[in-house]
Amino acid sequence: MLPAEEMQSGLTQRTRDGITAVLEGRKRGPGAALLFAGPAIIASIAYMDPGNYATNIQAGAGYGYALLWVVLMANLIAMLFQALSARLGIVTGRNLAEVCRDTYPLPLVIVMWIISEIAAIATDLAEFLGGAIGLALLFGIPLFWGMVITAIITYGILMVEGRGFRPLELIIGAFVAMIGLCYLVELFIAPIDWGSAAFGVVSINLPDAAALTIAVGIIGATVMPHAIYLHSGLTQNRALIANEVSRRRLIRFSNIEVVLALAVAGMINMAMVMMAASAFHAGNPEVAEIETAYHMLTPLLGGMAASAFLISLIASGVSSSVVGTMAGQMIMQGFVRFSIPLWLRRAITMVPAFGIIAAGTNPTDALVMSQVVLSIALPVPMLALLHFTSSRRIMGDYVNGPTTRLAAALGAAVVLTLNFVLLGGFFGLTLPFLPI
């Protein structure tokens, strides 16, 4: 077993000593930066979960490359808020949920906790369904048993954390690499119209109300509430900080990792949209389900493309389930100072997913709507994080500057506006500025 202090920090003594040496300036070189890799990589898997597959397939099949700008915008917002979350943990030594609990009135804290738990359940819904769909297609088994297998694999990986956090970081990193490699293969196989793709990245356009729903789903699938909570927890006790020079160094390494990890996640999401646009938009724009997309890839792009798609989906479902469970535990402990056994949390958050399958609901429709739920829940951690990181009382000299504060406010405003427009559409309100 690991020593108690290593179990508490989640890192081995060797890793902690290496991080300290870098922060004190005694160790340099390419290997030094690798010691800090981990928190953003783990958070980034939330941006490649099966919910992204559902929304990105619908975006590419239905609208070609037209919604790529939404993916880019969502990824830039995600980079900013993940960096702020990491900074909050480094500066305060507390995670976002703990700062909420210590700052806000109890009734508000309870409401925020409930909303955040609903978001965690919606996250688990997407993860389990995605992993189950992939396994069901691979082994030809019912979706229900695919979910059971996903749950068992997830629990097994979570048990690795008991041997130290670094092995878990390496496992998640391997899943990210697997997903990225699969979509690199897809880009080589699919006949991408690179000119149209480039135009879609920079041309802001929402063709109709359905595109708006998918755009909000992309935001919800990309900027994840539980990832914002989790990142601050992954950085709060990662290193022993002796002085402010070391703290600033740690924040700089954290920012670099966030940009690199989420840039990879953003490129993978764009590759998903481009693959769907290339394969389905011209002749099969109605493709909206993961199962349909998989079955049609073989005749359209060949067996290798279909296999790469399936392998990446399974890797996404399993790894994001692990990260979702970690985040759920942190949210509960942070808000209400209460924890439950890992197996019980896994069971509780799985119940809605099993219920949806038992009710015969279309899995891809459930995935897309789960991302809309996440987008509606997202303002809670976003606004709280913006509040705390803009407070000198909480952050001291590390408070947001005017430019960062403005960028974060604009990002939150974009999400809130899209949510308001979506809810307005649900209630039948006329939205004259939409091109429909």
Image (cartoon, grey):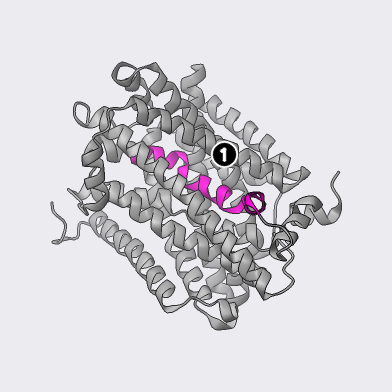
- In the rendered image, is residue 229 in sight? yes
> Is 360 above or below relative to 420?
above
Q: Residue at image x 59%, y 79%? A: 394
Say if the magenta span includes residue 42: yes
Closest to the observer, 218 or 309: 309
Q: Farthest bottom residue?
A: 393
Q: Residue at image x 34%, y 27%? A: 293
> Is 418 above or below relative to 369?
below
* Quarter placement of the N terminus: top right
> Is 169 above or below relative to 382?
above
Rendering quarter of residue 76: bottom left
- Give left or right: position of 8 versus 87: right
User: Which secondary structure lies at badge 1?
Assistant: helix
Closest to the observer, 435 or 40: 40
Rendering quarter of residue 168: top right
Q: Residue 148: percent from the left, percent from the top?
A: 59, 29
Say if the magenta span includes residue 171: no
Q: Residue 170: percent from the left, percent from the top?
A: 65, 41
Q: Residue 5: percent from the left, percent from the top?
A: 83, 57
Residue type indicated by callout 1: Ser
Q: Give, as a single range, the part of the protein colored magenta.
A: 29-56
Q: Give the main secondary structure, helix, strand or loop, of the magenta stretch.
A: helix
Q: Residue at image x 72%, y 66%? A: 24
Disc 1 crowd rating (10 Å Cα; few below 14, some 14-19, many 20+) is many
Tally of numbered discs: 1
- In the rendered image, is residue 335 in sight? no
Q: Residue 279: percent from the left, percent from the top?
A: 27, 27
> Is 336 above or below relative to 137?
below
Closest to the observer, 186 or 101: 186
Q: Residue at image x 57%, y 67%? A: 87
Q: Which residue is mark 1?
A: 319
